[in-house]
Image (spheres, rainbow, N blue to C red):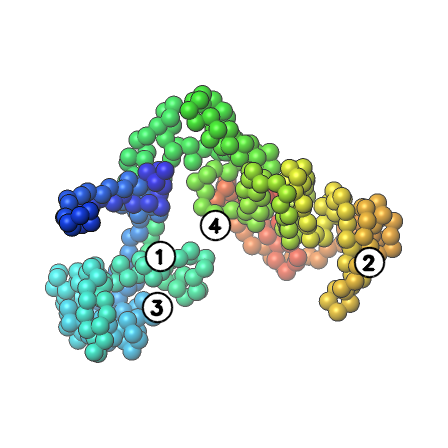
Amino acid sequence: PSAYSFNTASVRASGAITVERGAKKAVKATYEKTGGMCPRCEGRGSVTDFDLTQLYDAGKSLNEGALTIPGYSVDGWYGRIFSGCGFFDPDKPIREFTERELHDLLHKEPTKIKVEGINLTYEGLIPKIQKSFLTKDKEAMQPHIRAFVERAVTFTTCPECDGTRLSAGARSSKIKGISIADACAMEIRDLAAWVRGIDEPSVAPLLTALQNTLDSFVEIGLGYLSLERPAGTLSGGEAQRVKMIRHLGSSLTDVTYVFDEPTSGLHPHDIQRMNELLLRLRDKGNTVLVVEHKPEVIAIADHVVDLGPGAGTAGGAVCFEGTVEGLRASDTATGRHLDDRASLKETVREPTGVLEIRGATANNLRGVDVDIPLGVLVAVTGVAGSGK
């Protein structure tokens, strides 16, 4: 399996091993592990290009504060390492560096050095930035770090694997003319149809399990996703349902599942699909406990426990326990709410202007033009994954 995994690098080694059988004896051995990681982009699918003018001011020396990377000030720890490493003159402007000195500043491989009596490892600016900044999700970065990365680093699709993150070997292995990269790029509904057309008795149980999982994606309205989508690009509702499919595909029964507001942020259309999932989990012989506010979810419960009567210090008591019909007939806040139908405002505030969005194409948006009115409360609605 590792031969088709973008997380696993290929490894080769040879040398002597010691065999302790009778007298110890050295034996020549070779070791090989085939991974699927693209060696060029290291399984990331994109390669980075650095704008050197954003890393340093070529007219200054290191001691004059040439480095403009966050956290690399002259007085900081990194600044002292680069000034005291001994590979270049810290008082010489960077534009006067020799080719060798510039290479050591930017690209030098990890090397043991001693700075201010402390043993440490020195490496060039670019590999250091790649390890400390570029291994993190951009959205999780501190604002000033993210601004630096957006300013200094350009991400382009890896030319060797074409963004698939897989090595040539993994991409060249095919089933009915389709490689694993091609399969991951398909919409799940198309992939399910393709898997259904594979007739291979030797892996029949595997195909059945795979088919059931893919069909579950389609049934709950996620057939438009593809398996190559990064998890961070999924909406809240999509991520919730993907997790639930994993449990649905489990062979375990007599399990108690506890869901805390599984429909939060979901469109009514998606709530119905989530309800179907909850019922299917129950029908497999499991106990499903749901903490929920939405009337649509309360309505499908076999048993309801209503807590209240208010929130915080005004709560903590069981106000009702029984069927949904009994809750509806009760005089609790939840019971009254089930039949409450709010009305829309007849008049609304006038906007003070508009925020113009033109030609938006991020993720699955298709050339969207929209004007968002300013100075008013605006709702953007739609099913999960629709591009909100």
In the shown orientation, is residue 54 left or right of residue 271? left
Instruction: Tell me how far mark 2 sits from mark 1, CA to CA.
Output: 52 Å
Q: Earlier in the sequence, mark 2 or mark 1?
A: 1
Dot 4, how many residues are within 10 Å of its Cα: few (below 14), some (14-19), or many (20+)? few
> Circles 2 and 1: CB distance less than 8 Å?
no
Task: Say which residue label 2 marks.
Answer: 319
Task: Please name which of the two marks, 2 or 3, marks the residue nearer to the observer.
Answer: 2
Task: Say which residue label 1 marks.
Answer: 134
In the shown orientation, is residue 374 left or right of residue 36? right
Task: Specify whether residue 238 is in view.
Answer: no
Residue type, mark 2 in image: Cys
Dot 3, how many residues are within 10 Å of its Cα: few (below 14), some (14-19), or many (20+)? few
Q: Quadrant of the N terminus?
A: top left
Identify the secondary structure beneath mark 2.
strand
Label placed on residue 232: 4
Task: Please name which of the two marks, 1 or 3, marks the residue nearer to the observer.
Answer: 1
Q: Nearer the viewer, residue 146 or 114?
A: 114
Residue type, mark 3 in image: Pro
> Circles 3 and 4: CB distance less than 8 Å?
no
Instruction: Tell me how far mark 4 sits from mark 1, CA to CA.
Output: 15 Å
Task: Specify whether residue 300 is in view.
Answer: yes
Q: Earlier in the sequence, mark 1 or mark 3?
A: 3
> Circles 2 and 3: CB distance less than 8 Å?
no
Residue 119 figure quarter = bottom left
Dot 1, how many residues are within 10 Å of its Cα: few (below 14), some (14-19), or many (20+)? some
